[in-house]
Amino acid sequence: MAHVFEQASSGRAKCRGCGQVIARGEWRFGERLPNPFAEGEMTLWFHPLCAAYKRPEAVLERLAEGAADVPDAAALERAARGNSVERRLPRVDGAERASSGQAKCRHCKQRIEKGGWRIRLVFYEEGQFAAGGFIHLDCRQDYFEGHDVLEPLLHFSANLSDDERAELMRAYGAEPGRAPSR
Ligand SMILES: [Zn+2]
Ligand SMILES: [Zn+2]
């Protein structure tokens, strides 16, 4: 079966991209995959924009088939195209201040100081997302080959307060108001 955009018939599924429940009646994207554990297929459910950022190829595949009546299809396509140009971009899972000084940056291998901004990474493999550590916010240029990650970074940082988001944008060097806030 092909990937699907549809309105959720129940409010039980959690989005694989952000971990939040997909409310009944809300639009969702279903990525169909061969089931690694049994016969047949499995479906991974996402909010449409979460899928565009984390599974861009699957979203583009579905959009290319046409007649996707999902709202904001053009914005979804833009997000998916943006994140499909470099294999590391779909790893962005949000930003946070380091809760301890223990973790090392996956890019420069130096410790990330307590309280410093870091980008969470996730790795996708065969239908599973696994936590993949962190990089310094300031290592993003090198790690992502110069690609801008502000929009997915803010999108997957829904647990930050408005003040923290403003601080993150300052630390990122972004103009206030450049990216959509919540
Ligand atoms: Zn989501
Ligand atoms: Zn680093």
Image (tube, grey):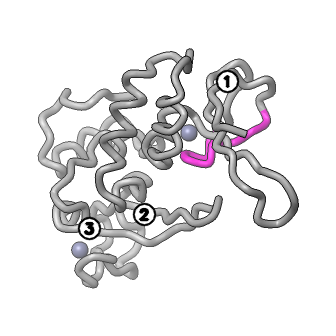
Observer-side mark, 2 or 3, equals 2
Q: Secondary structure at mark 2?
A: strand
Res. 121 mark: 2
| Region rendered in magenta | 12-20
Picture residue at 86% right of the left edge, 63% below the top? 38
Determine if the magenta segment contains residue 25.
no
Contact check, label 2 and label 3, Cβ < 8 Å: no
Residue identified by numbered label 3: 136
The nearer-to-camera label among 1 and 2 is 1
Q: Residues within 10 Å of mark 3 (few under 14, many from 20)?
A: many
Q: Earlier in the sequence, mark 1 or mark 3?
A: 1
Q: Which picture quadrant has residue 137? A: bottom left
Give the residue at x 41% y 61%: 120
Rendered residue at 18%/63% (across/down)? 138
Within the displayed image, which quadrant is ligand 1 positioned in? top right
Question: Is residue 121 shown left or right of residue 131?
Answer: left
Mark 3 CB near ligand 2 (8 Å cut): yes
Cα separation between marks 1 and 2: 28 Å
C-alpha separation, residue under disc 1 versus residue under disc 3:
37 Å
Amino acid type, residue under disc 2 in the picture: Leu
Mark in front: 1 vs 3: 1
Question: Which numbered disc covers residue 118?
Answer: none
Q: Is residue 19 magenta?
A: yes
